[in-house]
Image: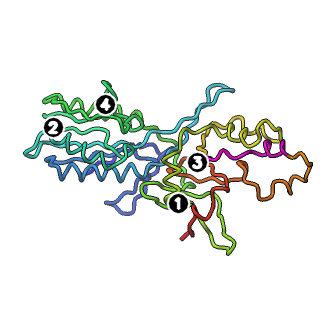
Amino acid sequence: MKFVVYRDDKSKSIIFESSESTKIFPIESVLGIIEVKSQLSKAKLIEGLENIKSLKTLHAPQLITKNYGDRIRIGYYNNPPFGVIFAYSLSNNSLESLRNNLKEWCESNPPEVWPNFICILDEGTINFKNGLNDVLISSEIQETSSISSLQHKENSLFEFTSTLITLCANRKIDIFNIQAYKNIGIMVDTLRVKFESKIMNIEGQRIRLSDSFIQTMYKNRGQPIQYKDLVEKFTDGMNFIGKELFDDRVDKVYIYDPDNLPNISELLSKNTENKPIVEMLQGVPMFASGTYVIINEEKYYIPLYYWNDSNIVLFN
């Protein structure tokens, strides 16, 4: 049995009803799910883990902004939905054996899809720890997190209830934007990938970045920068009309540029022969000529230089 926990706020959430017995919950409106098992055997544990994985794979980070007065605007991305397993009893096993089963499963799956909490009524709980500290929020669960099992016995229900309240409070829901579904993208393993621009080859066929290149880009993504800093990197101090319009943007973007390509300012500084700008820049790899790819609802900037024969495939 599965329970979907969602925000019942019609100003922000929307639930679709395909029939009297079937409801469709957009992932943006879901706080999390609770997998309920009568007896938690290894097989039922894995079943619950895979269902939680399916939910978390759908997570689409939303940039939530808040204004503080007239001059301060802060933006942050919401936490992923949570996944919890609740069981009424063990199944001829123990908390420790379930902890080992979870550890084995986690070794084959990324931390982004791990469960937040497991509770067996009148027995105990299983959760993650960073050092000595318990961690419940999805964004805090890391590959280095350890797995802990505790025998709370009759206090297990209180642990479950208090944990559920904490998880709900830390999942922020922004206004549902159905426009985002115009471009549903493609799936590359567990990554949802959207291309903002249509890129064509010389035969007029649409192309895209290959699965292996997308996975490499995601694996080596580093830390994002603010969009206004990307604009500054484009120009390297050069002034242009409308540049100030980007100052209030609080969204962030990842950059893929392992070759550290030069920007326009650097190239112009090398124009000692005073060639026309169009002639000088023609065919020259540079940072400012690029496109955007969205991976799991986070934006990546990739110079067109990396759209080469070794990194592209036909868009089917």
> Residue 255: x percent and y percent?
61, 45
Query: Which disc is residue 129 wearing?
Result: 4
Query: Which quarter of the figure has residue 228?
Result: top right
In the displayed structure image, the side of residue 125 where residue 196 appears, left or right: right
**10 Å crowding of disc 2: few (<14), some (14-19), many (20+):** some
Query: Which disc is residue 185 wearing?
Result: 1
Query: Which quarter of the figure has residue 291?
Result: bottom right
Three-letter amino acid code at disc 4? Lys
Whether label 1 touches label 4, CB < 8 Å: no
How far apart are labels 1 and 3 at the CA level?
13 Å
Label 1 or label 4, whichever comes before in sequence order: 4
Three-letter amino acid code at disc 1? Gly
In the displayed structure image, the side of residue 123 where residue 6 appears, left or right: right
- Mark 2 lies on residue: 96
Three-letter amino acid code at disc 3? Lys
Whether label 2 touches label 3, CB < 8 Å: no
Query: Which disc is residue 299 wearing?
Result: 3
Label 1 or label 2, whichever comes before in sequence order: 2
In what element is the residue under mark 2? helix
**Range of the magenta residues?**
257-270
What residue do we see at 58% from left, 36% from top?
Answer: 65
In what element is the residue under mark 3? strand
Query: Which disc is residue 92 wearing?
Result: none
Label 1 or label 3, whichever comes before in sequence order: 1
Query: Which quarter of the figure has residue 131?
Result: top left
Q: Is residue 269 magenta?
A: yes
